[in-house]
Image (tube, rainbow, N blue to C red):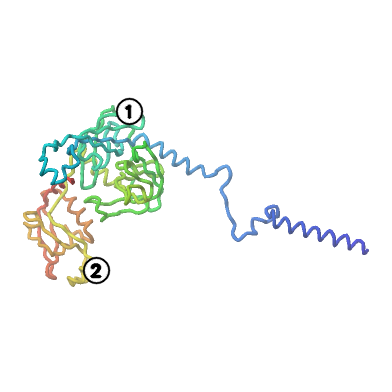
């Protein structure tokens, strides 16, 4: 009997020792091991391996890449032959005989998006601004001369045309109004001239404005890498549908910092249709400069919680001037549409057809004043040097 208990004790000791070793070194061999951790983890099955999203992005890229083109522009600029011509002492002794202003060629690059099978291409105004020659290179290697149909500096959009038949690959427009922060997007273009490139990111923000990039701003912000040369390229959703035209980046050194801006396709489509139909964009104008009502301004004018915009300046001889609008007035509404900031005011006025008479409700000296103004045509912005 004693021998039996001795064998039992030895077997139990060996078993417990083996269990301790297995539990320490190979716990997965023990039953119910998955439930022994702090939290249960659910891993993707081996046959999936994350391939579905990758295939989706690949399909989106293959769909949009044929419709994105490289845009090369060149222009003639005049530069002095001598680097000393800017020195007044050099001019004093030698005069202007060295200043021949010999023409030199300046080139730049950008991107564009084919929007119709017969060769209309949407790009940025700053890509083709002041260009003497435009060459467009398609993804399949074909090249053609591009001609400007029209441009709109106020939104930084332009339309050019190439004559390469009527069967070009055209992009499919998405619905930027239904985009959400966090949506996956792809940016397609020609950064730094290295060739067509696709980058991925998300929608970081919507309706970005007051950036000083253009007159009318309603940008989609994205962290998809956008670099010089991407301007005019496509920002598309995960299915390859156009959400916006890549336009600008925030960067002190010219490289991507994950803050890029694209013009929504809803804006681009309206501007594109007007340019193709009329060669330009016509907007309403009354001739005022406004600024938003900050808490400090509300307090200084003792306005309480008034909603509107402050008339900072009235252009002499403009429709607003003729209607009796004065600097210092608070513009409350246009055609009974309440105003909350300068962006809404600008969009409201620009959407009115020139010649239309509309009603402005103003607050002047704590009293409401209603005036009628005949909307004029917005003048073209002066070209920047």
In this view, 8 is above or below 265: below
Image coordinates of residue 352 in percent, x first then y, are 16, 50
Q: Is residue 118 left or right of residue 18?
A: left
Q: Nearer the viewer, mark 2 or mark 1?
A: 1
In this view, 80 is above or below 256: above
> Mark 1 = which residue?
142
* Pointer 2 local density, CA inside 10 Å: few below 14, some 14–19, many at least 20: few
The residue nearer to you, when weighing 240 against 204, is: 204
Rendered residue at 68%/56% (across/down): 32
Label annotation for residue 295: 2
Quarter of the image where one finds residue 1: bottom right
Quarter of the image where one finds residue 291: bottom left
> Earlier along the polypeptide chain: callout 2 or callout 1?
1
Image coordinates of residue 185 in percent, x first then y, are 39, 46
Rendered residue at 13%/58% (across/down): 359
Q: Secondary structure at mark 2?
A: helix
Residue furthest to the top in view is: 165
Residue furthest to the right in view is: 1
In this view, 277 is above or below 182: above
Image coordinates of residue 193 in percent, x first then y, are 34, 37
Distance, label 2 to label 1, CA atoms, is: 57 Å
Residue 278: tell me if it is visible. Answer: no
The residue nearer to you, when weighing 65 against 24, is: 24
Image coordinates of residue 171 in percent, x first then y, are 33, 37
CB under 8 Å between callouts 2 and 1?
no
Q: Is residue 226 left or right of residue 26?
A: left
The residue nearer to you, when weighing 332 against 296, is: 296
């Amino acid at each position: 009997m004693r021998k039996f208990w001795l064998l039992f004790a030895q077997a139990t000791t060996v078993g417990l020792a083996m269990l301790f070793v297995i539990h320490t070194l190979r716990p997965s061999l023990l039953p119910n091991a998955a439930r022994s951790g702090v939290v249960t983890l659910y891993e993707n099955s081996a046959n999936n391996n994350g391939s579905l999203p990758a295939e989706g992005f690949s399909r989106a890229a293959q769909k949009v890449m044929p419709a994105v083109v490289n845009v090369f522009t060149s222009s003639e600029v005049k530069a002095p032959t001598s680097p000393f011509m800017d020195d007044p002492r050099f001019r004093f002794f030698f005069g202007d005989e060295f200043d021949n202003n010999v023409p030199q060629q300046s080139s730049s690059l950008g991107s564009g998006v084919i929007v119709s099978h017969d060769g209309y291409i949407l790009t940025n105004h700053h890509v083709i601004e002041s260009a003497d020659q435009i060459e467009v290179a398609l993804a399949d290697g074909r090249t053609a001369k591009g001609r400007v149909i029209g441009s709109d500096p106020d939104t930084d959009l332009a339309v050019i045309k190439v004559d390469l038949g009527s069967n070009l690959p055209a992009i499919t427009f998405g619905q930027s109004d239904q985009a959400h922060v966090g949506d996956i997007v792809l940016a397609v273009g020609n950064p730094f001239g290295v060739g067509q490139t696709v980058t991925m990111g998300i929608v970081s923000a919507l309706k970005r404005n007051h950036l000083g990039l253009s007159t009318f701003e309603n940008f989609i912000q994205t962290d998809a890498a956008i670099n010089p040369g991407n301007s005019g390229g496509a920002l598309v959703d995960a299915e390859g549908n156009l959400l916006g035209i890549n336009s600008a980046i925030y960067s002190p050194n010219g490289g991507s910092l994950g803050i890029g801006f694209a013009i929504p396709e809803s804006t681009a489509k309206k501007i594109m249709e007007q340019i193709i139909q009329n060669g330009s964009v016509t907007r309403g104008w009354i001739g005022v400069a406004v600024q938003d009502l900050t808490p400090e301004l509300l307090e200084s004018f003792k306005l309480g919680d008034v909603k509107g915009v402050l008339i900072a300046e009235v252009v002499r001889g403009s429709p607003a001037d003729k209607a009796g609008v004065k600097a210092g007035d608070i513009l409350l509404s246009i055609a009974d549409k309440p105003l909350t900031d300068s962006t809404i005011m600008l969009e409201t006025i620009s959407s009115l057809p020139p010649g239309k008479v509309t009603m402005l409700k103003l607050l002047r000296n704590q009293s409401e004043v209603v005036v009628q103004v005949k909307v004029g045509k917005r003048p073209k912005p002066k070209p920047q040097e």
